[in-house]
Image (tube, helix red, strand yellow):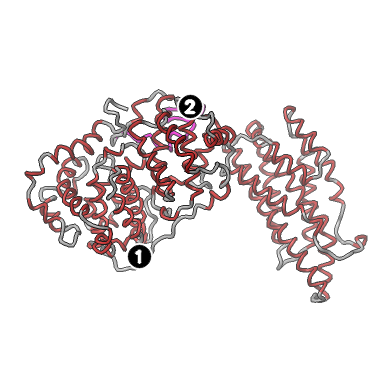
Amino acid sequence: MDLQGSCLSKDVYHLICEVWEEQMMKKESWSRDYDNCLRKDGLLDWGEIKETVLKDIDLSLIEGKYKLYVVSLLPVCYHVDIHISQLSEQQFIVQYGDQLKWTGQAQIFIECFKLIQSENTVDNILCILLCTAALERALGDIYLLKKTPCPFLLKDLLSTSELQEVFGPIAIFCLHVMIGPPTSLNIRNILWHGFAAPKEIPKLYASFLLVLIASLSQVLQIKETITHRSYFQLHHFTDCEDVFPEIVQTDEKDIHNLITTSRFILPTMQQYWFTALQHYYSGKYGYCCVLLLPQLENGLRGVFCNFNNCPQRMLTAESSVLYTTFDEMLNPILPNGEENALVSQIGDSLMELLLDMLTYMEGPRIRDHMSHGELDVLSMPQYIATYVLSVSLLFALKYSTENCLIGKPLLQKLHSVGENYVSFYHPVAYCKRSLQKLCQELSDWDQLPQISLDVTSSSCSLESISVRGELKQRILSGFDSSQQSIVQSCSSLSILDCVKHLNQAAQIRTLFMPRNELEVVGLLRKISSQGTESAKQIKQISVTRFQQWQTRDLRSRQRNNYVKFLKCLPVLSSGLQLMLFVITTQISLINSTGRLEIRNYHSLIKYLKSVLQYAENLTIFTSPGKNKWDESTLLTDSFITRTEEFYS
């Protein structure tokens, strides 16, 4: 931070804060023409804006001259703010409700109006955060009418000829000034990345943005019906809903004390945390998350800059330098090729926690989805806010200047979670859960209903069943001397119990896993998924055919096929259990994959691809429409033989 106590760099601070103050001192000299830029119905008069604000501006040359444009727009923003401030909620709905329907999210903007009526400056910031996210989503819906992929970044979306054609150059100019590139006001990025303190963003920008969005309805030039995309569903958090302790009203005092004593939270940013906590306790869980995620980034940026010895990166960047954001902070290597000191500073568990929440492609990536307007903020469940609040408090706790744990149960529980956290959304975590499903599917095969048979007349080979014991020991021999306790524990266990033990005992380091290890994990997941599908199909066939046998609903050919199925069932069970065991041992040994010689690595990949082929074919042969039991048995025998050869 600079001497002003701001995270805004000198030029950014001047454009956002000082230019506004300078112009407010001159407002008595503003031309009365600016009054006409706001129509009597409360919408912007685009014609008047062109004549008054843009009369000396070449819209094709706006880049690099944003201070001039901010000065030109400020009188309009001022008049809009005065108008908005005089409205009641009902008057706002009557005046702007229909004009906001084009966004498909009119209610969120009505809630934004309520926020800017608040005396709490943080709620004004929250209004801008919500507005920019919802606007980006709405503009993306408009762009998608052109049947081409939507740009990921808002500044790139605003620069498209498609939106220029739909809204016209004057409206797009206003959007560029407010939320365009880094040289503009750029309040969307400055706030979503946690740079600005609450009092640094004038309220009139929130008011203007709200009216600007409503006024876009008047220049919207489309003939098609706008199809609005559905919200993204954050089902991920149900997997770890109980990871963090419940946060209740009685914890508020301890949390307040933590916020005021933690070096993780800048004094100028504390009000964000207090307001987020208020929204949490009042049941506005989406608001809590929207406020905390940028502040988590701000606090983490401070740690990153401190331990990587780059204090200047704490400030907003200019157009020639990128912001220091989560993307860089959560990378193991810095742009200059050096190691990121943040990783060792916060430790593996907390880094995994951040990657889980923000980065992993199969994780919730809540910051991305929320900042791009893809989540239903107004209906967010409590457990998601509890997760975000808990993670934020964990980092505040790590850098507290006081011992905040003694006599404070919530903080003690949070500390324990942070010390022992294991990833939920890394590919390894998904693989282990898939293994558990397959193990569960196979664990109750002994109880499958079946008729009595004379197995001596079976046409299915049973030789494969007898090799499992010896083969199991050869597979376990892959564990090194430091893991012999695991091997010894597994020696006397059945295959399924051995799998359960390995899943619990194996210590796997998933942080920044190398590509070759991820390749193996990817194959193991596919094999497990196919194996689970086969096991489900076989179990369903067993139940259905038994019922049909009991009720005499099977024709002669179906009865013969059912008998063949039952005789082959032990072989299929043997094959699926061996598949499960192979996957489990390989995932337990995954961190040693990187130490394999190239030849051995390629041999492993080749073998696993053959196992995947077996799993895929077995899924086909055991499907209800196929019932190819002889073929399934031959396939299983071939798989076991191939496995014996690989582990010989």
Q: Which residue is mark 2?
A: 339
Residue type at numbered disc 1: Ile
**Neighbourhood count class around disc 1 (C-alpha, 10 Å): few under 14, some 14–19, many 20 upward:** some
User: Which residue occupies the foreground of this view, 386 or 590?
Assistant: 386
Query: In the image, which residues are magenta?
Result: 320-344
Relative horizontal placement of residue 319, taking residue 646 as reference (left or right): left
**Residue 165 in view:** no
At mark 1, the secondary structure is loop
Q: Specify the quadrant that holds the C terminus.
A: top right
**Neighbourhood count class around disc 2 (C-alpha, 10 Å): few under 14, some 14–19, many 20 upward:** some
Which quadrant would residue 608 be assigned to in this image?
top right
Q: Position of residue 422 (x, y in %)?
A: 59, 38
Is residue 204 one of those drawn in magenta? Answer: no
Query: Measured along the vertical axis of the image, is residue 50 above or below residue 20?
Result: below
Precedes in sequence: disc 1 or disc 2: 1
Relative horizontal placement of residue 29, taking residue 581 as reference (left or right): left
Rounded to the nearest angstrom, the CA distance separating label 1 from label 2 is 47 Å
Q: Specify the quadrant that holds the N terminus.
A: top left
Residue at 44%, 49% in the rendered image? 285
Query: Measured along the vertical axis of the image, is residue 119 above or below residue 405?
Result: below
Residue type at numbered disc 2: Glu
Query: Measured along the vertical axis of the image, is residue 457 above or below residue 410?
Result: below
Q: Position of residue 436 (x, y in %)?
A: 69, 48
Q: Main secondary structure of the magenta part?
A: loop
Query: Measured along the vertical axis of the image, is residue 482 above or below residue 293?
Result: above
Label 1 vs label 2, nearer the camera: 1
Number of callouts in the render? Answer: 2
At mark 2, the secondary structure is loop
Q: Position of residue 241 (x, y in %)?
A: 56, 47
Q: Which residue is mark 1?
A: 226
